[in-house]
Every structure is written in structure tokens, then in C-alpha cells.
Amino acid sequence: MGTEARQLERLRRVIGEVLPGNAFYAPRLQAAGIDEGIASLEDFAARMPFTRKQELATDQQEKGPYGSNLSYPIEKYTRLHRTSSTTGKPLKWLDTQESWSWMTEAWAEVLRGAGVSAKDRAMVAFSFGPFIGLWLGFEAAQRLGALTIPGGAMNSEGRIEAILQNQVTLLSCTPTYALRLGEVAHELGIDLGQSSVRKIVVGGEPGASVPATRRMIEAAWPGAELFDHYGLTEVGPVTFQCGQNQDLVHALEEFQFCEIIDPESGEVLPADSTAVGELVITNLGRAGSPVLRYRTRDLVARWQGDACACGRKGLSFAGGIIGRADDMVVVRGVNLYPTAVDQLVRSSTEILEYQVRIHNERGMSELEIHIEVEPAADESAVCAQVEKAFRDTYALRIPVSASPAGSLPRFELKARRWIRE
């Protein structure tokens, strides 16, 4: 059975679970004339309307606390998590034991893609709160038989100490926090090249697919290979990085049905298009609280090729997640995404942290960038270097200024470097 046939079989199973009791999706499916006998993925995509985050937020507000996107009675649910609220009010998300196991297996595929096995010792470096992502990473490492070391209730110094004492081989965290741990280790005079860490699996934000950020993380952790991962609380794990090609992430097609659409028109981009489009996702197993044709607002570009170097032939994305449609800023006619800014700023290895401030001037968006540099670095020279990078790359004059040491915020989970004033 081919990939599309398996996806269709799983989609039919999810629809069959949703129709009897899910008050959010059952009316939508019925209005579209869709049931568990849907003929094809194409037919589903043509008839099923999109789901938007605001619709889910409104549903939870009106039918709180958890909304109506629940396929079973509340007694069947065993997990509560919520979105990290990068934009808007956090969504609360419930999972049954079956749905949670399905997502854990998807995360296990992310780790298998990085070559993780029972021989590894895994540290998931974050505080275990309502954010869903790294809970899954922790339990997936356990599922693969790895010795797992919890990293909650520790500061950065404590986590570094635990990594060294327990001879951790796998570190999982956000790209920002991997850099922060490297910064703290440097301050403590610790050479992370002497640690046992050989794999770093990151997620929660773009970074590992940004070449300059990747170089900085790998420089901070000599001997470790970096692997990117993308997922959402509402969706679960979606992609993992190819072990043979750092510029490519593979879609977890056994778990998600992915479409790429034009962000403006909503039209599905053809399979031979490499244009940047918005990723739309349908769960193929999270029947307890699924999303169907969910507009992520995350932008990707389909990779075209007969087969990857690793042997995979399925849906893959070049450059990982390019950015969010919501985050794009037009500066004097130039479209700028946070990942593009990250690439230019991180090209200077002397920059420890940065912040982007956006303000409106005469009806137009303008940027200014604040950076923190290494103590021994020439602040003026580094600022001039970044300004030149923006002129050379985008023909934009972007002011860059140095901030005092330690004045810019550090982050454990998702970084919030873009400040709209």
C-alpha cells in the first residue's frame, strides 16, 4: 500500500471517530458531504473548509474551558496542554491516551531520523509546564529505550552539570536555549567539546534550518550534530531533519496529511511548484482532538527531487520553516522574515543576543536592531558589519546599535526577539 493509500485509510478512520460526537467538526463534515467513505485525499481537500486558529480560540471562549473540538466524553481525556501563546491567547488542548501515544510515536520518528537509539542518554532541557513540545520528546526518548534525564527545576548551570555528570549524548531544547547553554558554559570556563553530547534535536522555533544559527550552535557544542524538528500543539510533530541533507526536512506523512497553499488566495499549489506557500495540516491519528485542514500560517517551499540522499521520496521542504505569514514585515518595499534577519545577524559570531524593534514611521514599518556582543569585540565594528550585511543583501539601511552586556532577555523556550512598538 502506497503512502497516499495509507493516508486515506487513516483519514477515513479519524473521520469515523469525529462524526458521532465532535460538536466542532461534525457539522462541518456533514455540511461538506464528507463521511468515512470519502473517495480520495483530493476530494477531501476540495470539499473540506479550512480551520483557522481564531475559530478554535473563539470556540474555546464561547464553550469553555476546552471548547467543542472533543470527539469523546471528557472522562476519556488524560492530558492537558496549551499553546505557547506566541500570538494571541493560549489554546488549551486535551488528549486521550490513544492520541497521546500516537503523537509520542510521531516524535519517536523525529528521534529515529537523528539516529537516536537505546544506547543514548537523553536530556530534555526545559521546565515541564503546560507547553506540549518537549514532553513528547522526553516520552519518545523513553519509548526508544534511551536513558532519559529530566531537565526541569534547574537553572542553566545545573543543566550543564547534569549533562556532564550523566554523560548525556542527546540534548533536546529550543535553538535559542542551545545557544544560551553554550554561552553559560563559556562563562563558566567549561569546554562543551569535552561533553558526550553528539546529537542536538531542536524545535519550538526556526533556527536549526538557518545556516548561520546552525553554525553558531555547532560551534558552541563541538562534536555534536544538529537536527531540526517542527510541530505545533494543535497538530503534533510534523517534520524532522534529513540526516544526509541539512537543508531539508521531511514531512511525517504517516501522521499528517500536508498541503501547501497560496497564503492569499487559499488555492492549493500544484505538486510541481517550489513557490513559498502556507502549510495546511490534517491529523491522521489524533482523533480525540484533531485538526482538519488547519492553516498553520507557517511558510514552506516544496523540495523537488526524485529521491533524497537518504532514500526518502515523499514530501520534503527546502530550508525547513521559512517563517510565518503573520511575522513578515514590509520595510520600504522589501519583505523581511525573522529567519532572514536571523541569518544576517547570526553571521557575526561575536553577537551573543539581539532584539528587533519595529515601529511605524509615516505609515511605513521600520526596523532597528539592538545587539549584545562578546566582551572583547569592537561594538562599533560589529554594528557596522551587520548594517553592511543588510545593505548588501536587501539594499536597506537598518540601524544597528549595541546594548549593554546582559541587558537583552535570554530565553529557555521560544525566543521573543521581535518587539512591535
Image: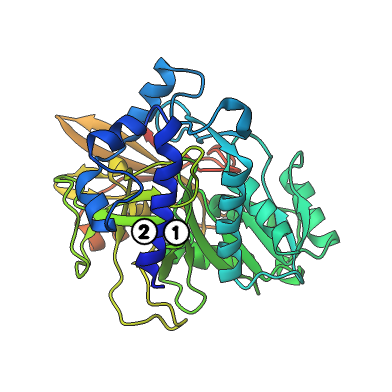
Q: Is residue 280 above or below residue 131?
A: below
Can you give x and y, in whole percent of width and height, for residue 21 in the image?
A: 45, 30
Q: Is residue 104 above or below residue 211?
A: above
Instruction: Please name the residue shown 39% across and 69% down the image.
Output: 3
The residue mark sitting in front, 1 or 2, is 2
Can residue 376 be seen by looking at this rendering?
A: no
Residue that numbered label 2 is attached to = 8
Pick whichever of labels 1 and 2 is earlier in the sequence. 2
Residue that numbered label 1 is attached to = 346
Q: Looking at the rendering, in which quadrant would you find the C terminus?
A: top left
Instruction: Please name the residue shown 51% across and 36% down the image.
Output: 84
Q: Is residue 25 left or right of residue 194?
A: left
Q: Secondary structure at mark 2?
A: helix
Q: Nearer the viewer, residue 32 or 268?
A: 32
Residue 251, quarter of the rendered image? bottom left
Instruction: Please name the residue shown 56% across and 64% down the image.
Output: 109
Q: Amino acid at mark 2?
A: Leu
Q: Looking at the rendering, in which quadrant would you find the N terminus?
A: bottom left
